[in-house]
Image: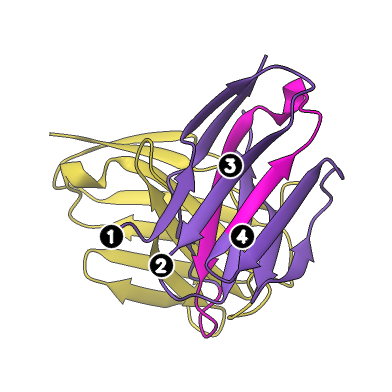
Chain colours: A yellow, B purple
Amino acid sequence: DQQVKQNSPSLSVQEGRISILNCDYTNSMFDYFLWYKKYPAEGPTFLISISSIKDKNEDGRFTVFLNKSAKHLSLHIVPSQPGDSAVYFCAASERRGNEKLTFGTGTRLTIIP
Amino acid sequence: DTAVSQTPKYLVTQMGNDKSIKCEQNLGHDTMYWYKQDSKKFLKIMFSYNNKELIINETVPNRFSPKSPDKAHLNLHINSLELGDSAVYFCASSPRTTQETQYFGPGTRLLVL
């Protein structure tokens, strides 16, 4: 039972353009959402998060949008840079501070120079 | 100055063997985790320890036994290895106040032949 879904396994974007990565979830108890970034042969690293009381959180080039009614979130990267090429995992927990994260299967983003 | 380290990075072994993976974090975190990433790229939590005490134990076969000698270490011992145990195993840790922000090790790639 996959409670967090990333339906696009891969995405290619031209350098300088906007990258949009999508994530859907089914568990209505999820209350806190995170994005992790993973380079080959490394572990995931935390990128940005959002609480369900917000619909947007911005950190530099990265913005996460949350649509609770649609159970959908997205990560926007503007402008995309070659160093952004990585696998991006969406994750969710039932509350902030809850150590149990449920991850999606990831989207491989390739930035084309 | 590696924050979360795992040994070994690669492990190739025969079915039926017993093996251990070690994890150490030098971040002073209270909580440590073991995750399994299978061939379908699902990253699923297996165990979580807080100050050497088991707090999450997902549905994992009894052949898997975590051991936390102190709060900086969480080792994973696997008995009677099976083909299906082949995966990448990630260790992670998180601070008490923001347990959803987890710091991952580089992963241990286990191949059971």
Residue type beneath disc 2: Asn
Residue A69 against residue B46 in the figure, above or below: below
**Residue located 52% across and 37% down the image:** B108
Q: Which of marks 3 and 4 is nearer the N terminus?
A: 4
The quadrant in which the C terminus of chain B is found is: top right
Task: Locate residue A70, reporting x and y percent.
Answer: 62, 64
Q: Do the residues labelled 2 and 1 touch (CB within 8 Å)?
A: yes
Q: What stretch is highlighted in magenta?
A: B74-99
Distance, label 3 to label 4, CA atoms, is 10 Å
Image quarter in which the N terminus of chain B is found = bottom left
Give the percent coordinates (x, y) of residue B58: 80, 56
Q: Residues within 10 Å of mark 1 (few under 14, many from 20)?
A: few
* Residue labelled with disc 4: B33
Q: Which chain is disc 2 placed on? A: B
Going by the image, does B20 lie left or right of B93?
Answer: right
Select label 4 or label 2 by which is in front: 2
Q: Is the C-beta separation of discs 3 and 4 under 8 Å?
A: no
Q: Which amino acid does label 1 sit on?
A: Asp
Q: Mark 3 points at which residue?
A: B89
Around disc 4, counting alpha carbons within 10 Å, would you say few (fewer than 14), some (14 to 19), or many (20 or more)? many
The Cα–Cα distance between marks 1 and 3, rounded to whole angstroms, is 21 Å
Of the residues tagged 4 and 1, which is closer to the observer?
1
What percent of the width, then of the height, locates residue A60?
A: 22, 70
Query: Residue B26's mark?
Result: 2
Answer with left or right where residue A18 lies relative to residue B34.
left
User: Chain letter of disc 3?
Assistant: B
Vertical arrangement, residue B72 with respect to residue B91, above or below = below
Q: What element carries label 4?
A: strand
| SS label for mark 3 | strand
Q: Distance between the residues labelled 4 and 2?
A: 14 Å
